[in-house]
Image (cartoon, grey):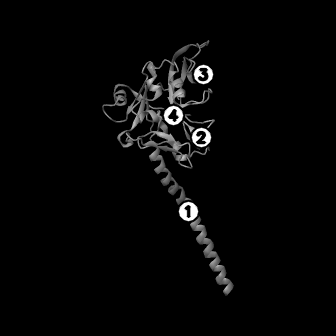
Amino acid sequence: MIDSEKNDETRRNFLRKLCYSAVLAFVSPSLVMRGKNKKIVEWIIGENYNPYDHYWSMGIDINKCIGCGRCAESCKIENNVPKEPFFFRTWVERYHIYKDGEVAIDSPNGAINGFSKVVSEKSLEKSFFVPKICNQCDHPPCVQVCPVGATFKSIDGVVLVDANYCIGCRYCIQACPYGARYIHPVTRSADKCTFCYHRIVKGKLPACVENCPTQARVFGEFKKKASPIERFRRMNKINVLKPALNTEPKVFYANLDMEVK
């Protein structure tokens, strides 16, 4: 009888510990995130900048892009992006559409050094340039898969990465449908476009926008009538990349062809 009572008590203690462990495993990440988000808020808010007053987005006019690559070059300089040709926060792709329906895409060194002349025996129907960048999604899959909360969406709508928390697991890289992320070879953390966050909080434009010679890029406040980006959206036929994914990008394209991926 005594042994039976001891066995029952042992089982109860085991079940109690098991339930406690399960609850702790579920709750603790949220508690950690709550404490970490407090630090994040302190990190992103400057003395004279209130993120609650802003919600940022970008527009890109395909017809104005000349493929000069100054956006990619200025981005690398401004954000200390490694010079190797496979690290980019923004880059430019050239599309060749042939009459037989074939689509060819190239982007040598992100377009920093320009493009070579097209040499092909096929009949070319049209060719154009498409700047690519992190789409700053309203429903970012990269944020959803980050196991430690290092990738997050700021109050003013910009998806950022806290390198101090990033563990380099690459989940966000796999989840991004736009190929806009990479692992920085020095910090070993995920890196991507931030709309030059360190500049916009000081009232400046992102480096790629400021250095575009044809003003193919427009930057401003999302859904504010007087904003340049809202005028851009009113005056052009607007599309986003991969709309079927429902990520709700805040990078809007004017004159985007259906062949663009």
Which is nearer the eye, 215 or 46? 46
Tell which circle, 1 or 2, labels the residue nearer the N-terminal end: 1
Q: Is residue 61 among the parts visible in the rendering? A: no
For label 2, the SS is loop
Q: Mark 1 points at which residue?
A: 24
Which is nearer the eye, 81 or 16? 81
> What amino acid is labelled 2 in the image?
Ser
> What amino acid is labelled 1 in the image?
Leu
Label 4 crowd (10 A; few <14 / some 14-19 / many >=20): many
**CA gap, disc 3 to disc 1?**
50 Å
**CA gap, disc 1 to disc 2?**
28 Å
> What amino acid is labelled 3 in the image?
Pro
Q: Quarter-wise, where is residue 120 in the image?
A: top right
Tell which circle, 2 or 3, labels the residue nearer the N-terminal end: 3
Is residue 63 left or right of 167 when viewed as pictured?
left
Residue 65 locus on image (x, y percent): 47, 20
